[in-house]
Amino acid sequence: MPTMKLFNTLGRELQEFRPIVPGKVGFYGCGPTVYNFAHIGNLRPYLLHDTLVRVLRSFGFEVTHVMNITDVGHLSGDDDTGEDKMLRSAIERGKSVLEVADFYTQAFFRDVERMNILKPTVVCKATEHIGEMIELIGRIEARGYTYSAGGNLYFDVTRFPSYGELALIKLDELKAGARIEIDPNKRNPADFALWFTKSKFENQAMVWDSPWGRGYPGWHIECSAMSMKYLGEQIDIHAGGIDHIPIHHTNEIAQSEAATGRKWVNYWIHNEFIIMDKVKMSKSSGGFLTLQTLIDAGYEALDYRYFLLGAHYRSQAQFSYEGLDSARSARRSLGERILALREKAGRGPLPEPGPAAHSYMEAFAGHLAQDLATPRALAELWGLLRDPAIPSGEALAGAFEMDKVLGLALESLAAAERAPVEAGFSAWIEERIAERSAAKAAKDWARADALRAELKEKGVLLEDSGSGTTWKRA
Ligand code: AMP
Ligand code: ZN
């Protein structure tokens, strides 16, 4: 296996990956705040996490992947400014915070599943780990890093000399260019709340008892507390979007290392943003694109997966429908190529890839080992499938092996196009259609959409009309 190299934000260089325990990897990726649907930009970090996990597993590492679900404490500004995202969403929708969290958590998992993103080993909700957060805050307090002011408990960044190392920021510069809407309780603008008791909101929905009073945790502490619970006090890799570097991850490091007195994370991986016609894509700006928007426009979730894999995670990528069209046609050609090779290879079991096919597979692994160079890896897949010197069966076997990492569902792509519509299958389709009609009658749109997506995944398209629903093969 090639040596894995990752671009570590801590140090800003490509580094050889060496796990703490040989052969095992503890990986934590910051998860969603479940106050709204994920927009298509939000899905990029989860595809990156998925790719990282798949690549490491293909290299023989045993990976424990932990992802949090933020359902409390995340204010609209990462630096304790603004309103609680969950509470605001609940008020706007006339629902409870828990209802909002449940609804958008399910929507999130439906999206990532449709994109063939594997479920993390552990998914943990902030509200189910308040005890762990309180305990960790207690440790930070016992080591003298905190102060109370205005009813809240704050982390004093001046007590942590390497504060800002990840973001290459210096404390004195931060003081000068103070962050907006300064909380008068803070001694330094970069200090951050570990525990709030004086809520900014009259009707803060979720509060818990703590040694600092009845209240709720600051946002950053959940990632430190939950990663330590599931991965131990030192972890190999931590990932998230680049927007997390200056505040969220900087604060996570400060509080974690303050609590334990030693280095917390060895490798920090950050994805660049997906932008749209130079406009920032954000949940708060309204009218953002979701995966469902793309599906409704006739694309498949895996077209978007292919689109994302076509750009390196550390480059900013511009989303456009033209770009998505190219991804869709590339994926279709991939399906046709695979089908043609299948016809040639026959239906029997596939042979082991020989040396020529292997050289593509090695190059493929080599690119991925080089900081997850997915565009180059995709080029090797195409090279393998197009090389006339490689017997069809071997090319297919190699492509399916590569697809364990790419997750483009190549085997089912070929199978779906081949499968005749046998009696059992059409009965199964009719059952799904009846279930979907019932869901629509009960206004369970999420279920109805999920059924449509499930059918589409199997190559079946639905057409609704006044007289009912009909179906056809895609
Ligand atoms: P949120 O659910 O709002 O906490 O965001 C989830 C993740 O999406 C975070 O890791 C962000 O860094 C990331 N993110 C937000 N906007 C974009 C974007 N336009 N492109 C890529 N990643 C993004
Ligand atoms: Zn986090």
Image: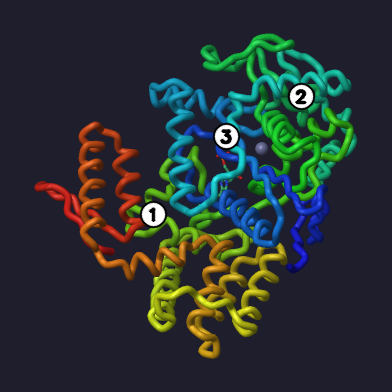
Residue 312 locus on image (x, y percent): 62, 63
Residue 430 locus on image (x, y percent): 20, 50
Q: Which mark is residue 136?
A: 2
Tell me if residue 433 comes above or below residue 384 in the rendering: above
The structure residue drawn at horizontal position 75% and vertical position 34%, both measured from the top left corner, is 251
Alpha carbon of mark 3 to alpha carbon of mark 2: how far? Answer: 18 Å
Q: Amino acid at mark 3?
A: Ile
Residue 421 locus on image (x, y percent): 24, 63
Q: Secondary structure at mark 2?
A: helix
- Sequence-wise, the earlier of marks 3 and 1 is 3
In the picture of the structure, the residue carrying the numbered disc 1 is 294
Q: Nearer the viewer, mark 3 or mark 1?
A: 3
- Sequence-wise, the earlier of marks 3 and 2 is 3
Q: Secondary structure at mark 3?
A: strand
Q: Is residue 111 left or right of residue 259?
A: left
Q: Which mark is residue 261?
A: none
Q: Is residue 335 left or right of residue 250?
A: left
Q: Secondary structure at mark 1?
A: helix
